[in-house]
Image: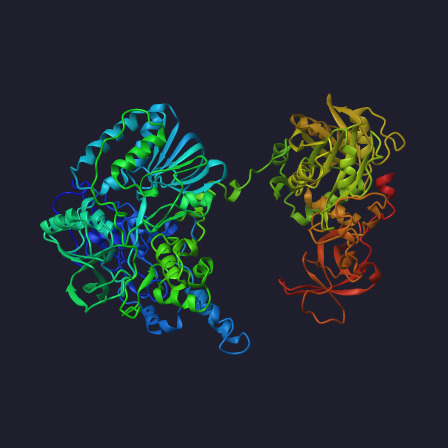
Amino acid sequence: MTARRLLGGGRIDRSRQITVLFDGRSFAAYPGDTLASALLAGGQQIVGRSFKYHRPRGLVAAGVEETNALVHLRDGGRHEPNAQATMVEAFDGLTSTPQNAWPSLQFDVGAMNGLLSRFFGAGFYYKTFIGPFKGTKFWMFCEGFIRKAAGMGRATTLPDPDHYEKINAFCDVLIVGAGPAGIAAALAAGRKGDNVILVEQDRDIGGSLLNEPIGAPSDGWLAQARAELDDLPNIRVLTRTTVFGAYDCQVFGLLERAQDHVLTPQDGKPRQRYWVVRTKRAVLATGAIERPFVFASNDLPGVMLTSAVRSYLNRYAILAGERIVVATNNDSAYIAAIELANSGAKLTICDLRREIPPQLSANARTAGVDLRPGHAVLKVVGGRSVKAAYVVPVGADGKATGRRVRIACDIVTMSGGWAPALHLWSQRFGKPQYSEELDTFLPSAEKGAFTCVGSLVGSPSLRDSLQQGHKAGGAIGSEPALFGHADFWGRNLLPVTVVTKADGSTPGKAFVDFQHDVKLADINQAYREGYVSIEHLKRYTTSGMAADQGKTSNLNALARMAELRGLTIPNVGTTTFRPPYTPVTIGAIVGHDHGLHLRPTRLSTIHDWHTENGAEMMDAGLWLRPWYYPENGESINEAYVREAVHVREHAGIVDVSTLGKIAVQGPDAAEFLNRVYVNGFKTLPVGRLRYGIMLREDGFVFDDGATARIGEHDYFMSTTTANAAKVLAWAEYLLQTAWRDLKVHVTSVTDQWAAIAIAGPKSRGLLMDVTGANLSREALPNNHFTHVAIAEVPCRLHRMSFSGELAYEIYIPAKSGRKVWEALIAAGPTHYLKPYGLEAMGALRIEKGHIAGSEIEGRTTLKDLALEGFASSKKPFVGSVLRKRPILEDPMRPSLVGLEIIGDRGATAGSLLFAMNASRRGHGEGWVSSTTYSPALKKNIALALLSRGPKRFGETIQVVDFVGNQTQQAKVVSHHFFDPEGHRQNG
C-alpha cells in the first residue's frame, strides 16, 4: 500500500498545515482532513486490530460505515473510545491511539487467537456453558477470560471537564441528509415558507457531490445552493449532526458534535448537543452504503470500498495506491477506476459480469484500465498489507470456473452493489421491501409523514434524485438541473458478493462482518446448527451487533443464509433496526442532568431561616432539610439528644413543609379515598382528619399519611416526603385507567403550602397565646383541625402527633411560611420553644414506635407492621385481595418489634438478626430497620423486623453487622417503647 498525497486537488485547506498524533507518531494534515485521511496520507497501513482474532486491519471506508478504524481520542477526562477515524475531523494537537492491541499495534500477542480460530467459531462462548465436562467448572474457568475479552475500547473513569446541552426544537419539515436530494428538498420547502431543519452528519453539506473532482459542474450548483440556504431565514442547517433515532409522532433524536473538532471547547460552549426535534413531516435523504465482497483475506489492510478510495482521491487529494485491483458487479465502480487511472494509478477491473455496457467499457480502456469481464478476486495475498490478488474467472454464482491468476497490487477495492441507509425509516415502520432488480431492501417512497428520496429509494441518476427532493420539498421554484455520471449501480447488477472456489469453499478466512470477525464459515456453521432465523443468526454469530450495526455486513449475511436455505432474500427477512444509527455518547444523553443537577434541589420557604440560624442541612429526597441545630460546638449525637429531650420536656418546632400534599376534589372524592386507603374514609366528617395506609396492588404497604376533610367534596391528603410524586402518579394512573368513571381531580399542592409541626407538653399553651383560639382537649381533640390566624396569616391547624407528644401541624400559604415560623419563634421563649431537626424527629418517632420509610420499604405488609387492624373488612381496596396470599400470611414472616440493645453501642441499620444459638450465616431471621439512642429510656433502641416477632418478646438475640464486623445482643420488646397508652399525645 503506497498511498500518497497529490500535489493538487482535494477539498482541503493547503494554506495551513496541522499535526495529528496516532500511536505516538506525528502525521501532517490540513484543515478539511479527517484523522483517517491524515493516516492514509502518512502511510499508516494498520489502524487497528480485529476484535476476536486480533488480525491487522486498515481503513475500509471513508464515512460512517467504517468498521476497522476505531480509535481512542484525547487523554484524561476527555478520553473517548470507539471513535471512527473516518468521522473525526483533523485539528492541530489531536491525539489518538489504537484499540484492541497489546503490547503494541505492530506486535499484538492477541494475534495468537488466529491460530486457535477453529475453537473460536460462531457461538463458542455459548458452548462453554454446557461442556465438554460435567458441572459448571469449565464455564467458570472460561468466564473470566471471556469477560476480559468482551467489549471494545476503554472508557475513562475521570470526570468529564466538558458540558453538554439538550435542546427541544420544532419544525414543519425535517430533512435528514444534505446530499443533492436533501438540499433540493430544503430549497423547495424553504421557498414555500416552511420552517425547515436540514441535518447533515458531515462537516459540510453536499453529500456525494463532495466526492466529485474539484471544478466539476456540481461545484457551481452546490455553491449557489449554499448561498440560497444561508439567505432563507426559515431554514436551519445543522452540520456535524447525526439523526440517530426516529420515534413515534415524528419525534427524532439528533446528536450535534458542536465542539468535537477543536482541541478544547470554547468557554461556555457545549462539546455536544442532544436535540429532540418534533416535526410535521420528514424527508429522508440518507443515501446508500457500498457493499463489500466476501472473498479470502478480504480484511487485509489495503482492501477498501471503491467509493472510499474515490472519496480519498477527490476530497482529500490522496491516491490510495499505485497498483489497484477493482472488484465489482455493477457500473458504479467505473467512474472511480477511471479517475484513479487518470491520477497515475495502474488499474485492473475484475467485473463479475460478462457483459459490460459498451460506453463504460470503452471509457475504461481509453483510460488504460485492464478490464477483465467475468472475473473476480478469489483471494488477497499479504500479511500486514496487500501484496497481490488472485483473480479467477467466475460463473454467475460467484464460483471459480478456471485457473487463478496472480496480479501484483497494493490496493484491492470492492463494489458489491449498494445498500440504502434505511435505518431511520425501519425504526419507525419495520420491515422494508426487497428489490430483486437492485438486490437490496428499499423503504416506501411515501409512508405517513415520511418521504424518502435519492439513493435511499434507489434513484437511478443524480437528475432523478434532485427531482425527487424538489418534489418532496414542495416543488417551489425552478427545478434543479444537474446531470451526473451514467454509472447507476442498479443497472445490470449481478447480485453476487461471495466469491469461492469451484467447490464453494474459500482458500482462507473470508469475513462477512469485519468489526466482529464473523467469517463466511460462521454463517455456514450457524446454518448447520439450526440457527437459520435471521434474528438467531445475528445473535449466534454476532454479525451486525457491533458498533457499526452491520452497515456493511447485514445484506451479505442475509444473502448467504438465503443461499444456504435455498430461499430468496425477502423470504429469509431482515433483522430489526433500532436506535441509535451511530453511537451516542453518554454525556450527550445526560446533558446537565447529573450530580446535583439530576433533579432540582428543593427548598422550603423557611430554608433561609434554618441556614441563618446555624442548622446543619441534609438531603431528604430532593429536599434540603435541617438535620440538627448545634449549640456551642455540639456533635450531632449531642445535639439531637438535647433536642429530643427538650421536646419531651417543653416544646419543639420543626419544618415539615416537605411532606407531600395532594388536593383530592370532586363528587367521588370520598369513594376514591375509600378505595386507595385500607381504612374507611367515606364516613370522615368535615373538620376531621384520619391516618390512612395505602397498599400496592400486590398487597405490600405503599405509603401512609393523614387526610383531612376540608369540605363535602374537598380533601387534603398528606404523604411521606419520599413518596409524594409516586402517590400522585399512582392516583392519576388509577383515575385515568381503572376508575375512569369517578369524578375526581387530584392536584399536587406541596409547593402551595408550608407546614410546621409544634410538639411537646407546652405546645398547646404556645399556640393558644399566638392564635387566641381555644385549643383545649375538648375544643380540639386529637385528629381534628381548625382554622386560625398567626401573625395575621390565615392557617389551618391540625392536631396530630408523629412524636408521641401533644403535637400540632400548621399549614400556611407557602409565601408566608417564614413569617409564621418567626412569629412562633418570637413567642417561644416563655414556653421554652426550640427548633429541632430530622435526627431528633427520628429518635422521637422510634421511641413512639411509628413506622417511616425504613419500614415501608416495599417488602412489608400490614401484618408485618402490626397494622392489620386498620384494614376494613367492609369494603374492597387496592391490594385487598393479594395481601391475603398464603406467602404473605405465613406466620414465619418477619414482623415489627422493638429491640433494646445490650451495651453502650447502638446497632447499625441493616444488621441481620439471629437467634442466640444460631450460626451467623445467611440472611438471618430478620433485620434492623431503624436505630437510635433513646433519651427518654436512656438506652440504645431499634425497630426491627423479626420472624415470629411478637411471640418472641423477652428473648435475647444476636444483632450482626457483617459490613462493620460487629456482633451485639438485644432484647426483643414491643415496638411501642414510650407511652404505649398514648396519654401524652391525647392529653
Vertical arrangement, residue 516 with respect to residue 706, above or below: below
Q: Residue furthest top?
A: 792
Q: Is residue 205 visible?
A: no
Tell whether 500 sits left or right of 346: right
In depth, the one of 417 and 195 nearer the eye is 417
In depth, the one of 535 and 371 nearer the eye is 371
User: Which residue is located at x 39 percent, y 73 percent?
Assistant: 119
In depth, the one of 294 and 122 nearer the eye is 294
Vertical arrangement, residue 796 with respect to residue 153, above or below: above
Vertical arrangement, residue 611 with respect to residue 531, above or below: above
User: Which residue is located at x 65 percent, y 26 percent?
Assistant: 815
Residue 108: image quadrant is bottom left
Vertical arrangement, residue 406 with respect to residue 173, above or below: below
Quadrant of the image for the C terminus?
top right
Q: Looking at the picture, how far across and down is residue 981, in whole percent?
A: 88, 47
Image coloring type: rainbow
Quadrant of the image for the N terminus?
bottom left
Tell whether 138 sits left or right of 214: right
Q: Looking at the picture, how far across and down is residue 820, in whole percent?
A: 70, 27
